[in-house]
């Protein structure tokens, strides 16, 4: 166990949370397996004090942002240059990198509270629990702590290795893919396997440095599947109406990035809650449930889909 993490466990599943670095979930294991999440251990503890000027740290794991991204620096008054420029990077350092207070902890659950954010104008509360069946419940709640209305959604972002596979049940007319195209980057190939969208991760061509694309999806069912060589993670959430989601975003977003080196390969499995207008002291919340399954089948899309369909029928509870 890493001394910088708070661990909770139940039903053979263990979760590690970097409470001093944004209460980021950086470790997920089933029955003693290696970490299923992509996470950079060197950032599990920060020695610097978090301020408005603190830059992004690639911790990976599972984090909670707010949306829309275009509003990240427009609703604050502590950095006038970023407000005028409507900067879309980095995310709020207080919520994503600050030290969270542990409000309550048991063997299988933890409740945490962020410092007050000078950028997003909220305090964020996180509840993380591992149920007896090994499923992981994650809830994030935000409270408006400034004396003016704020407009936000709650944005869950779970990172796997970029060579893992993501599957989302949808239709082609409910999926838009935006590649990152420039002198150094080219698109990530994607396809539909039956009713499921998936990326086909591959290295960039020799004359390019990376491949990156993001898919904006309204799913047929409210679930994202992440498939590694040894596990399948089913991420379930509420199916909100498409009109409730900020026009810049989608209920589900999938980002895939590869380079010639495997070190920075990244797959992001993202969910957005409805956009809400929060009056002072008002709160909003969103949740996910993760179900983790062992996987020892072939590393093929057809085998992945067969196992996913088996799981849906026999092993996934209805939330």
Image (cartoon, rainbow, N blue to C red):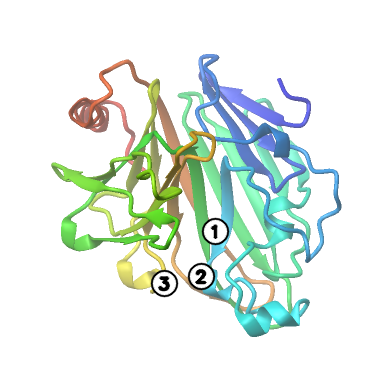
> Callout 1: helix, strand or loop?
strand
Query: Going from the N terminus, do you reach mark 1 or mark 3 first?
Result: 3
Report the front residue among 130 and 254. Answer: 254
Mark 1 vs mark 2: give the one in front: 2
Report the front residue among 168 and 186. Answer: 186
Task: Give above or below for 7 relative to 17.
Answer: above
Q: Residue at x 60, y 79 (%)?
A: 86
Residue 227's x, y, as percent?
Answer: 36, 31
Q: Are marks 1 and 2 in contact (CB under 8 Å)?
A: no
Query: Going from the N terminus, do you reach mark 3 or mark 2 first?
Result: 2
Residue 229's x, y, as percent?
Answer: 38, 23
Query: Going from the N terminus, do you reach mark 1 or mark 2 first?
Result: 2
Question: In which quadrant is the C terminus drawn?
Answer: top left
Residue 2's x, y, as percent?
Answer: 73, 24
Residue 228's x, y, as percent?
Answer: 39, 28
Question: In which quadrant is the N terminus drawn?
Answer: top right
Total numbered labels placed on residues in the image: 3
Q: Which residue is mark 1?
A: 285
> Callout 3: helix, strand or loop?
loop
The image's mark for residue 68 is: 2
Local crowd size for mark 2, using a 10 Å CA cut-off: few (<14), some (14–19), many (≥20) = many
Task: Give above or below for 110 relative to 48.
Answer: above
Task: Give above or below for 53 relative to 97.
Answer: below
Give the CA separation, mark 1 to mark 3. 20 Å
Mark 1 vs mark 3: give the one in front: 3
* Residue 293 as seen in the image, left or right of residue 62: left
* Residue 223 as seen in the image, left or right of residue 274: left
Q: Are marks 3 and 2 in contact (CB under 8 Å)?
A: yes
> Callout 2: helix, strand or loop?
loop
The image's mark for residue 212 is: none
Q: Which residue is mark 3?
A: 248
């Amino acid at each position: 166990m890493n001394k910088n993490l708070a661990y909770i466990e139940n039903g053979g599943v263990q979760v590690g949370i970097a409470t001093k670095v944004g209460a980021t979930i950086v470790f997920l294991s089933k029955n003693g397996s290696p970490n299923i999440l992509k996470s950079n251990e060197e950032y599990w503890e920060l020695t610097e004090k978090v301020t408005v000027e603190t830059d992004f740290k690639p911790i990976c794991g599972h984090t909670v942002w707010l949306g829309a991204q275009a509003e990240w620096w427009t609703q604050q008054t502590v950095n006038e240059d970023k407000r005028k420029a409507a900067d879309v990077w980095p995310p709020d350092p207080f919520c994503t990198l600050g030290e969270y207070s542990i409000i309550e902890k048991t063997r299988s659950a933890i409740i945490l509270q962020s410092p007050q954010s000078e950028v997003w104008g909220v305090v964020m509360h996180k509840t993380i629990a591992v149920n007896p069946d090994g499923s992981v419940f994650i809830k994030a709640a935000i409270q408006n702590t400034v004396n003016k209305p704020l407009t936000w959604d709650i944005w869950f972002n779970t990172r796997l290795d970029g060579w893992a596979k993501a599957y989302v049940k949808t239709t082609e007319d409910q999926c838009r893919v935006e590649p990152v195209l420039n002198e150094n980057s080219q698109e990530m190939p994607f396809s539909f396997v039956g009713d499921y969208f998936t990326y086909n991760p591959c290295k960039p061509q020799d004359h390019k440095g990376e491949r990156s694309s993001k898919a904006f999806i309204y799913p047929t069912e409210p679930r994202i599947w992440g498939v590694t060589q040894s596990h399948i993670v089913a991420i379930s959430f509420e199916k909100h109406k498409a009109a409730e989601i900020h026009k810049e975003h989608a209920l589900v977003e999938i980002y895939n990035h590869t380079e010639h080196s495997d070190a920075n390969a990244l797959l992001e499995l993202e969910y957005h809650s409805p956009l809400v207008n929060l009056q002072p002291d008002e709160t909003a919340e969103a949740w996910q449930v993760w179900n983790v399954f062992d996987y020892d089948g072939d590393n093929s899309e057809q085998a992945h889909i067969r196992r996913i369909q088996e799981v849906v029928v026999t092993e996934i509870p209805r939330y």
